[in-house]
Amino acid sequence: MDIDFIELGKYCQAEYKASLNGKKNKYSKTIFVAIKEDNNILVSTTPHILAQAKKCILIHERSCLAITNWYSWYMVQFINEKGEVFVNRIDEEFELYTVAAGGFDNQELRLSANQVDFFSHRAPFENCIQSLWDLYIRLKKANTQTERKLIASLFKSNQKVLELEKLNQDFKYKTQLLECEKNMYKEMLDSIKELLNKNKEE
């Protein structure tokens, strides 16, 4: 039986909205994550993206009033290929959930199994889902907890390398912009000097 993930996603979104009282808990948005057959990820804040899904993740966001400040809180749902909906869980072993780490304004998305955290990422979550899912696929293939810890450690190191490479690219780009700006001002100054010299000669 083919699962209509769009309708199922809309239903879960509506149920989540209905569960909030609207006074101290206000609905913000839902991140729809389509997991395709090849395990590539599509992310959107509208459910149309689920048309290509074989599985999906929904990350519901609400604004919650704590004393006098509003903070973002999340609920994670996973819908498998059978259309079964799980809350804060991918399967019988792996959990996918959010937690406040050190404060209400520091929400983290975590992937864990057997009380061991293998992945964590601070909000916003849109850009980390592909990495998280890639890691999950690798962890599922591991036979022992030791293998899983090693895979997660290597994965984290690789992500750090990618982050450093991006920072380096950003630095190079900014340096190029500054160099271009410097050359532009130099050309302007040269033009002004040339104009002043012409006026003196006249």
Image (tube, rainbow, N blue to C red):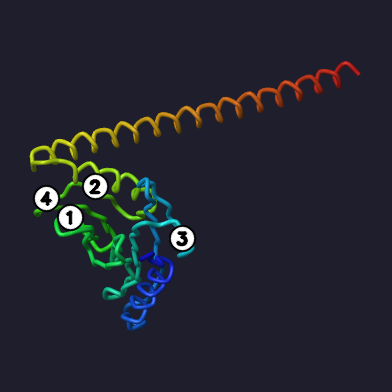
Task: Mark 2 and mark 4 in contact? Answer it, CB < 8 Å.
Answer: no
Q: Which residue is mark 1?
A: 94
Q: Farthest residue in the top direction?
A: 201
Query: Which numbered circle lies on residue 51?
Result: 3
Which numbered disc, 1 or 3, marks the residue closer to the eye?
3
Task: Mark 4 and mark 3 in contact? Answer it, CB < 8 Å.
Answer: no
Residue 87 falls left or right of residue 1: left
Which numbered disc, 4 or 3, marks the residue closer to the eye?
3
Question: Which of the 4 quarters of the picture holds residue 25?
Answer: bottom left
Above or below — where is 76 with respect to 156? below
Identify the amino acid type marked 1: Phe
Query: Which numbered circle lies on residue 116?
Result: 4
Which tag, 1 or 3, sits closer to the chain's start? 3
Q: CA distance from mark 2 to mark 4?
A: 13 Å
Above or below — where is 41 with respect to 154? below
Q: CA distance from mark 1 to mark 3?
A: 25 Å
- Residue 5 position, x and y percent, is 40, 65
Q: Which residue is mark 2?
A: 136
Q: CA distance from mark 4 to mark 1?
A: 10 Å
For label 4, the crowd category at 10 Å Cα-Cα, with few meaning under 14, some 14 to 19 and many 20 or more, is few
Query: Which numbered circle lies on residue 76?
Result: none
Question: Mark 3 falls on what kind of element?
Answer: helix
Above or below — where is 166 with respect to 15? above
